[in-house]
Every structure is written in C-alpha cells, then in structure tokens.
C-alpha cells in the first residue's frame, strides 16, 4: 500500500477499538482490507465473508475519512441494512456521515475547437467529432481540431492518518 495510508493490521486494530467502544455487547469478527479496484464508494461491508473493504483510491484523496468510513461500515456489520431511519440514528450515535464525500471528477485532458465558429469543447480523451452548433450530424467541414493539451492538476499529498488504539 501507500506509505501514507495505514496498513490493514492497523485498520483491524482500529475496527476492534471501535467495536469495543460502540458495540461492547456484540461479537463482530470482521477484518479490514484495502481495495484498489473500488472507485464508486468509500467502503463496503461483506457480511458472509466477514470483510470490510475500503477504497484505496477514495482514501488516498480523503485520508481523514478513514475513521468515518470504518464507523459507517461497522453499523452495517452490526446488522443494519440500508441507510434508513435506524441507520441514521446509529450514524448519529457513532458520529459518522451517512454518505461519503463525492470524489473529485477526472480532469479534462484535451481542448478542441471548431474551425468555423470557434466553439471550444473539453474532453478527457482524444475524439473525432464535428461541431454540434455548425452541424447536427457528422460533417467533415466542421471537424473539431485540437487546440491544446490541458494541464493536469497535481493530486493532493496524502497525509499520515492516526487511528485510535
């Protein structure tokens, strides 16, 4: 994993501390794993496997949200399905959010322009299109041309995260 994000054994210890603090009467035997494939959610609870997976991509951007995500998934691990009234009450008790922060969108990479009217179009990949203002279908006379490649913004530095013991 990243040098900045906690190791899985540290996450397991943090989860055990949260279980002891918020669910002392429940016997929850879950382990925490990082997932490099998850990108649509901050974390997921797999009941049958006894696993909580956290999105490495999400937490590389928002490392301060690890504890919040662990609390959120812990509520699911305790048997609260969905995000209804009961879940919201538990989230308030644990002090966590019901929904994760939205991931920043992928930046645009290319800037195209229409040779006739000058309309500019930003895209994330190279394309072959004609101007929608000048033609309602494909027309090679209004084929968009690359004006320039856009600068890619720097990704934020990942901070060291301190989890409770």
Image (spheres, grey):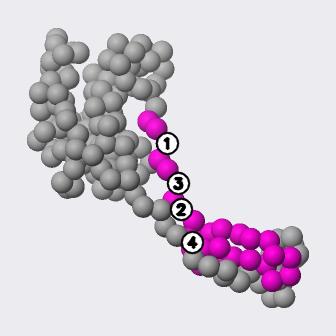
- C-alpha gap between disc 1 and disc 3: 9 Å
- C-alpha gap between disc 1 and disc 2: 15 Å
- C-alpha gap between disc 4 and disc 1: 23 Å
Whether residue 104 sits left or right of residue 123 in the image: it is: left
Q: Main secondary structure of the magenta part?
A: loop
Residue 89: image tag? none
Residue 3 vs 75, above or below: the answer is below
Write down the residue under mark 4: 150
Q: Residue at x 49, y 50 (%)?
A: 104
- Pointer 2 local density, CA inside 10 Å: few below 14, some 14–19, many at least 20: few
Q: Residue at x 16, y 13 (%)?
A: 24
- Where residue 7 appears, x then y in whole percent? 15, 46
Depth order, front residue of 149/43: 149
Verify whether residue 103 appears in magenta: yes
Depth order, front residue of 164/27: 164
Q: Residue at x 48, y 15 (%)?
A: 85
Verify whether residue 70 appears in magenta: no
Q: Residue at x 48, y 20 (%)?
A: 84
> Mark 2 against mark 4, which lies toward the viewer?
4
- Badge 1 or badge 2: first in the primary sequence: 1
User: What span is colored magenta in the figure?
Assistant: 100-127
Write down the quadrant of residue 69 in the picture.
Answer: top left
Whether residue 163 sits left or right of residue 89 in the image: it is: left
Asked whether residue 31 appears in the rendered view, the answer is: no
Are the two marked residues, 1 and 3, in contact with CB atoms closer than 8 angstroms? no
Write down the residue under mark 3: 105
Residue 102: image tag? 1
């Amino acid at each position: 994993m990243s040098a900045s994000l906690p190791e899985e054994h540290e996450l397991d210890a943090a989860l055990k501390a949260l279980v002891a603090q918020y669910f002392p009467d429940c016997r929850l035997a879950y382990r925490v794993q990082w997932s490099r494939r998850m990108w649509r959610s901050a974390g997921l609870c797999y009941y049958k496997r006894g696993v909580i997976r956290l999105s490495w991509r999400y937490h590389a951007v928002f490392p301060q949200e690890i504890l919040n995500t662990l609390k959120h998934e812990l509520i699911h691990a305790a048997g609260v399905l969905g995000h209804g009234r009961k879940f919201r009450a538990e989230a308030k008790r644990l002090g966590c959010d019901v929904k994760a922060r939205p991931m920043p969108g992928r930046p645009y990479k290319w800037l195209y322009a229409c040779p006739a009217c000058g309309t500019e179009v930003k895209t994330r990949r190279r394309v072959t299109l004609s101007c929608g203002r000048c033609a309602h279908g494909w027309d090679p006379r209004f084929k968009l041309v690359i004006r320039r490649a856009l600068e890619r913004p720097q990704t934020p530095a990942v901070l060291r995260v301190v989890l409770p013991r």
